[in-house]
Image (spheres, helix red, strand yellow):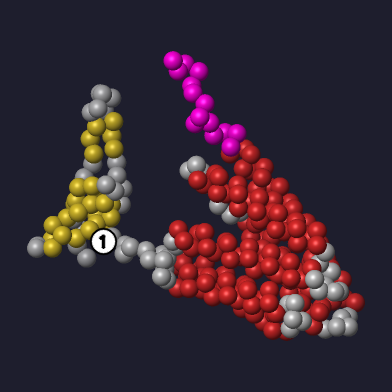
Amino acid sequence: MSICPAWVVDGSCFAKAGSETWAKRSISVVVWSVGFRDARFSAITWGMPAETSKSIYNVPNLLTSIRLILAIAVMALIPLAMYVSALIVFLVAVSTDWIDGYWARKYGQVTKLGRIFDPFVDKIIICGSFIALVEVRDSGVAAWMAIVVVARELLVTSLRGMIEGSGGDFSAKSLGKWKMVLQCAAVVAVLLTLIAQPAAAWLKWTSLGLLWAAVGLTVYSGYDYAWAAAKMMQDTPDASTPPKDAV
């Protein structure tokens, strides 16, 4: 592959190669200010073949769509007392969450749709599972626990939309990912307890411990996200407020 210089135009650079014009992606753009008004020099940059446009019709988004269908299946199977099937479908669904994220990062298929769709489906499968388990006797999942899980997700989603909508970065933290892992473990443990009725004492205590730990980490992570959002909003000036020296 030959590398040739090209002028930058709107973030891309173009170079003539025989009779064909090839789109080039600039590696860097260096703009030097020489201290004079409107006197700036733009450097000639070196280009490389541009990436193909990212389509929403890719493997990660397909896996996320499948996970949404599986999430709905889990919510339907639990009230029907089909706990073995619900457990299998749940495990397959949460495993695709790791696969689609890995695929998207490795093959450069991260899209705006995926950034919104993937966490949305995660919330559906977790919140839906907790809500469905509330109706099941001996599940150990109380109504207030499901409310806490749903409320936390609504809070963080609202804060993320508000901050990222204003140009800020409110990406998921490692604490949020561990919260997701613990919630999945709690759902699996509860389903195993329901499958093994009458369940052994150690399984009941393990299920109960994971459930309370998941709820506790859910509350703490929600507080952590809310605190981080409050600091970001406090540091960001309000665009609606005019400067003090404005006439």
Q: Main secondary structure of the magenta part?
A: loop
Q: Position of residue 122 (x, y in %)?
A: 61, 65
Q: Position of residue 138 (x, y in %)?
A: 86, 74
Please, is residue 117 above or below residue 139 in the view? Answer: above
Query: What segment is highlighted magenta in the picture?
Result: 233-247
Q: Is residue 83 visible?
A: no
Nearest the eye: 5 or 241: 241
- Looking at the rendered structure, the secondary structure element under dot 1 is strand
**The residue under label 1 is which amino acid type?**
Pro
Residue at 64%, 77% (x, y): give it. Answer: 73
* Quadrant showing the N terminus: bottom left
The quadrant where residue 97 appears: bottom right
Q: Is residue 167 visible?
A: yes
Residue 155 drawn in magenta = no
The quadrant where residue 123 appears: bottom right
Residue labelled with disc 1:
49
Residue at 48%, 63% (x, y): give it. Answer: 114
Q: Is residue 92 left or right of residue 201?
A: left
Nearest the eye: 39 or 147: 147
Nearest the eye: 14 or 236: 236
Residue 239 drawn in magenta = yes
Nearest the eye: 143 or 193: 143
* Quadrant showing the C terminus: top left
Q: Is residue 6 left or right of residue 68?
A: left
Q: Position of residue 44 (x, y in %)?
A: 21, 45
Please, is residue 168 above or below residue 56 in the view? Answer: above
